[in-house]
Amino acid sequence: MLIESINWMAGGPQGSGVDTASTIFGKACGYGGIYVYGRREYHSNIKTMHSYFHQRVSKQPIGANIADVDLLAAFDAETVVRHVGEIVSGGGLIVDSRDLFVNTLGDIVTFNEDYKNQIRNFQKENGIGENINDYLNYTKQRGIQVYPVPYMDLLKEIGGKLHIESLSVLSKMVNVLTIGVSFALLKYDRKLVEEAIKTTFHEKIVSMNLAAVNQAYDYTEDTFDTKSFKYQLEKQPANEPRIFLTGNQAVAMGKVLGGCRIQTYYPITPAADESEFIESHEILKTKTGNQEAVIVMQTEDEIAAVNAASGACLAGARAATSTSGPGFSLMVEGLGWAGNNEVPLVITYYQRGGPSTGQPTRHSQQDLRFAMHAAHGEFARIILASGDIEECFFDAAEVFNLAEKYQMPVIHLIDKGMANSSQTYAVFDYTKVKIDRGLIVDEKELEGKVYKRFQFTEKGISPRAFLGTKNAVQWCSGDEHNEMGNINEDPLNRRKMMDKRIGKLEVVDKEVPLEFKVNFFGDQDSECIVVSWGSPKGAIIEALNQLKEEGKSLGYLQVRMIHPLPSAYIKKLLMGKKCIIDIEDNHTAQLGGIVTEQTQIKPSHFILKYTGRPMMTTEVYQAIKAVLENKAPKRQVLMFGA
């Protein structure tokens, strides 16, 4: 039975190879022309705590995860306990046969007391005993097929074939065994899986991992009735070359294509992956065969990172820094300096759970207002929020144009959900990326003239000369200054400079095309409009498509440029609507509040999530449907995800 969409999950202790297994799974599906959407969830410690990875695969493009799990590959007993309730009837559970008699409350030491109470209630409500085997009997009663696999026995057989006696070496391949069992149950082309293995591992260990995946394939086909498992993956025709990448990688690639040649950072989750990806590919080949380089600088702290990036911008480079909430907090003074000096600085901001250290490896959209108002005083900045991985790529290039054209800092606002998700796309059309460096003057244009770096102009945008340009003496200061850059606290000068800097936001609002600032999906004439921003996009679109099939028509406004907000358009669109649903991953409905402030139109309903897990199509669909059927409170809080 070919299923339109299959949701596969792997789970196990942090450091057990869950990510690698999921990478192989996604690659193998991609090689077969199947679309993939993957999502990684992990604790902030390095090892031992539970982590898991969803991989949703489909014949059609997909943009979010769903709650139901069709096949769960459990690396350990904890994964069974945490996720058994998510497996659908008719689905499958792959489990290590060594875990059958693990006591859920006595042997699994990573459960805290609160979660143990949840387990006790779950066991009591469903009549489940204390051992994993009792859980497996429960799953069988729900029509779930269980596949116990003796991983250590299989590894010993592999060791005998390869003449490897060390179990510590062999045990690292349990993740590959789960891949072999999974794809054998799904009756997927073994050659495609082997190709994914070859492109994932270093050539020195490819052979042993190929042996592992084939051993698992053979064991599964010889031991289990794979025909009885209703799910099947089949290679699909791909009419175009495709790419499989994460949000971090998309941003890195977009930056480089957009001309970024200096990237500064201090390591922080989940932003650091972007800088490390650039660093691993920092030597570039041009079309002419020449080489260029991107300088990636790891600084001693975030204050140094933001100021170093500003210095590079002043010298003429396209420069950026990348960080998350706590790091951005430290950057704020440098951000204010860049705003005062009209520096075309780009800050890529990956939101994660706060406040303070909060949830270092978890998702949120809690920092919108912080990004809008951070730093003392008032100055112009642009905030652009991407909604999916493809937008991350193109926006990462375009933000440099915005920064240089309007000579102000630009904050590219992303979140952990997009950073650590992975998705299949047709290879991006790189020709869409254009470079616009704005109003730049050189030494010839300045011959015989007095250069005024902060010259008053009609639009407030002054001629910009790079530091070191002949005939372009200039000053940069944290203090208020005149057109030359010299410190000047005169009231009239102060008023004119403040008007100049902040007035550029009106220019941005007028000149940047509306189709760049917002996206609209669905029926504009509908009485019910969904308003959102950032990564809920995929789940919202899929939910609206499901509701459309049921005869319910809605519209969805995705706000991309949040500052300056295209308030006139939004007000016109929302005026008179009976139902406005604000959907965000934060507690206080921050975009909804900003829209209300600037349009005087308040959403009628809020669908919010702040558990640290991104929204899934399943819960968004259910929540919107409840609103449409007048069965929902004004404020719904979503809770899916372990």
Image: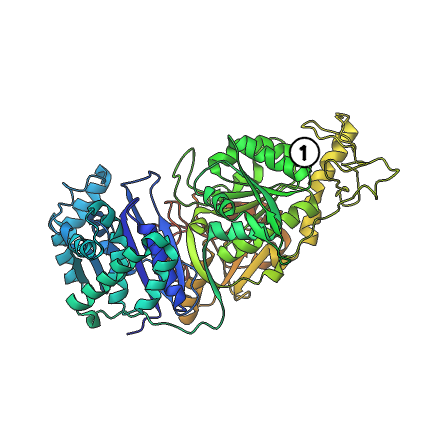
Q: Is residue 71 visible?
A: no
Residue positioned 65% across, 45% down in the render: 403
Seen from the viewer's position, the closer of residues 191 and 483 is 191
Spot the residue most to the front: 163
Tell whether 320 sits left or right of 496. left
Q: Mark 1, residues whose alpha carbon is within 10 Å: few (<14), some, or many (≥20)?
A: many
Image location of residue 380, percent across then percent down = 65, 40
Q: Is residue 601 visible?
A: yes
Residue positioned 62% across, 49% down in the render: 259
Image location of residue 201, percent across then percent down = 36, 54
Q: Residue 515, located in which quarter of the rendered image?
A: bottom right
Tell whether 563 sits left or right of 250. right
| SS at badge 1 | helix
Tell whether 142 sits left or right of 247. left
Image location of residue 521, percent across then percent down = 52, 63
Above or below for 369 versus 622? above
Spot the residue most to the right: 448
Q: Quadrant of the N terminus?
A: bottom left
Tell whether 563 sits left or right of 490. left
Image location of residue 160, percent across then percent down = 18, 55
Q: Residue 313, located in which quarter of the rendered image?
A: top right
Seen from the viewer's position, the closer of residues 455 and 422 is 422
- Amino acid type, label 1: Asn
Q: Mark 1 points at which residue?
A: 340
Residue positioned 52% across, 66% down in the render: 523
Above or below for 585 versus 312? below
Seen from the viewer's position, the closer of residues 167 and 639 is 167
